[in-house]
């Protein structure tokens, strides 16, 4: 079911927005990547199947989407790297960020929330 007209433009704009967040999530440890990629794919399937196919063929993002669509899980390496990068970024921010105590508390709460989500994600068993 492909949408047309104004709805198509809105879907494409939202897809671009969520894709931008996914790209940021790939480099910022506290921002998730996969949920934004899934939203992007959802919107592209309905507004531009050709762009969705291009996203699925992406070497960087395609495998993440396909793993989630097929298995509702992520690869163990993706999970391990995500946890390691998140912990590293949070620890370095806490040590070198010169943050006030309130900001450290917020950072710790966000980091803990993110880590709980990452740890609870199911992994693909080969």
Image (cartoon, rainbow, N blue to C red):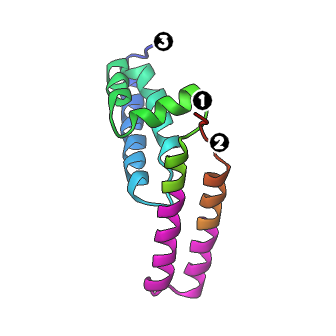
Q: Earlier in the sequence, mark 1 or mark 3?
A: 3
Looking at the rendering, in which quadrant would you find the C terminus? top right
Give the residue furthest to the front. Answer: 126
Q: At 43% from the left edge and 34% from the top edge, which residue is drawn?
A: 63
Q: Quick check: 113 above or below 14?
A: below
Q: Earlier in the sequence, mark 2 or mark 3?
A: 3
Mark 1 residue crowding within 10 angstroms, few (<14) / some (14–19) / many (20+)? some
Q: Main structural element of the magenta stretch: helix, strand or loop? A: helix
Residues 79 and 108: in front is 79
Q: Which residue is mark 2?
A: 122
Q: Quick check: 34 above or below 12?
A: below
User: Relative to residue 107, is residue 3 drawn left or right?
Assistant: left
Q: Which residue is mark 1?
A: 71
User: Relative to residue 61, is residue 32 drawn left or right?
Assistant: right
- Residue 7 makes an appearance in the image: no
Q: Earlier in the sequence, mark 1 or mark 2?
A: 1
Q: Which mark is residue 1?
A: 3
Q: Please tell me whether mark 1 sits on a helix, a strand or a loop.
A: helix
Q: Is residue 97 magenta?
A: yes
Mark 2 residue crowding within 10 angstroms, few (<14) / some (14–19) / many (20+)? some
- Residue 26 makes an appearance in the image: yes
Residues 26 and 16: in front is 26
Q: Please tell me whether mark 2 sits on a helix, a strand or a loop.
A: loop
């Amino acid at each position: 079911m492909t949408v047309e007209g104004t709805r198509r433009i809105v879907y494409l704009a939202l897809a671009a927005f969520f894709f931008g967040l996914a790209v940021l999530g790939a480099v910022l440890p506290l921002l998730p990547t996969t949920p934004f990629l899934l939203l992007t794919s959802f919107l592209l399937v309905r507004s531009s199947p050709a762009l969705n196919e291009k996203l699925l063929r992406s070497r960087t993002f395609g495998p993440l989407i396909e793993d989630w669509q097929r298995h509702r899980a992520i690869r163990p390496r993706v999970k391990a790297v995500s946890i390691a990068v998140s912990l590293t970024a949070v620890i370095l921010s806490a040590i070198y960020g010169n943050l006030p105590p309130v900001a450290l508390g917020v950072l710790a709460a966000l980091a803990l929330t993110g880590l709980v989500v990452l740890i609870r994600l199911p992994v693909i068993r080969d």
